[in-house]
Image (cartoon, rainbow, N blue to C red):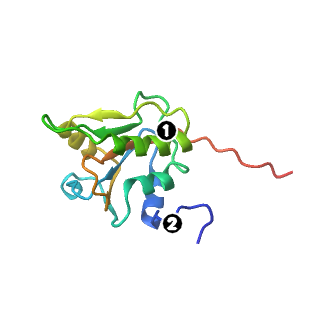
Amino acid sequence: MLRGIHPALSPELLATLCRMGHGDEIVLADAHFPGENLGPPVLRADGVDIVTLLEGILPLLQLDTYVDAPMVMMDAVPGEVLDPAVEASYREVADRLQPGVPAVGLEERFAFYERARGAFAVVMTGDLAKYGNVILKKGVTTVTWPSRS
């Protein structure tokens, strides 16, 4: 057992986050996402929603500060609308844990799937929010250790 690690983060997810390099992307996918068909390794977080995973991941993973949108959600298909509460819930976590993160980007549905094909991993969650999928781009992690004196 480790201290300071959110209990929703599995050992596999922690190892995946650790292996990611700057610029790598991870998909936090809703329960309906076709993650198994896309190619990247799939991790399971059944019963966990995306907001909870963001609460656990964002203290550990620095989002990329060199891109316009280090968080990208799937846009609604024509004729449908996004639930603004979904993005607002992601923003609230990002703003609290990594102040200054740019606005969440939107990616057309099939472009989002194509981008997800190149992701480092896909985390399949139990989240039922429509269009709840989000891609996180890892940035450069700076670590300051206490001095040994």
Quadrant in which residue 45 is drawn = bottom left
Q: Position of residue 67 (x, y in %)?
A: 43, 29
Alpha-carbon neighbours of circle 1 within 10 Å: few (<14), some, or many (≥20)? Answer: many
Q: Which residue appears at 21% of the width and 43% of the height?
A: 113
Q: Is residue 137 visible?
A: no
Secondary structure under the numbered disc 2 in the rendered image:
loop
Which residue is pictured at 51% across the width and 66% down the height?
A: 7
Q: In which quarter of the image is residue 82?
A: top left
Residue furthest right in the image: 149
Residue at image point 33% right, 39% down: 84
Q: Name the residue under label 1.
A: 139
Q: Name the residue under label 2.
A: 7
In depth, the one of 71 and 81 nearer the eye is: 81
Q: Which amino acid does label 1 sit on?
A: Gly
Q: Where is residue 29 in the image (x, y as percent from the top left)?
A: 30, 53
**Left or right: where does residue 78 sit relative to residue 133?**
left
Is 46 rendered above or below residue 146?
below
Are the residues at dot 2 and dot 1 in contact (C-beta closer than 8 Å)?
A: no
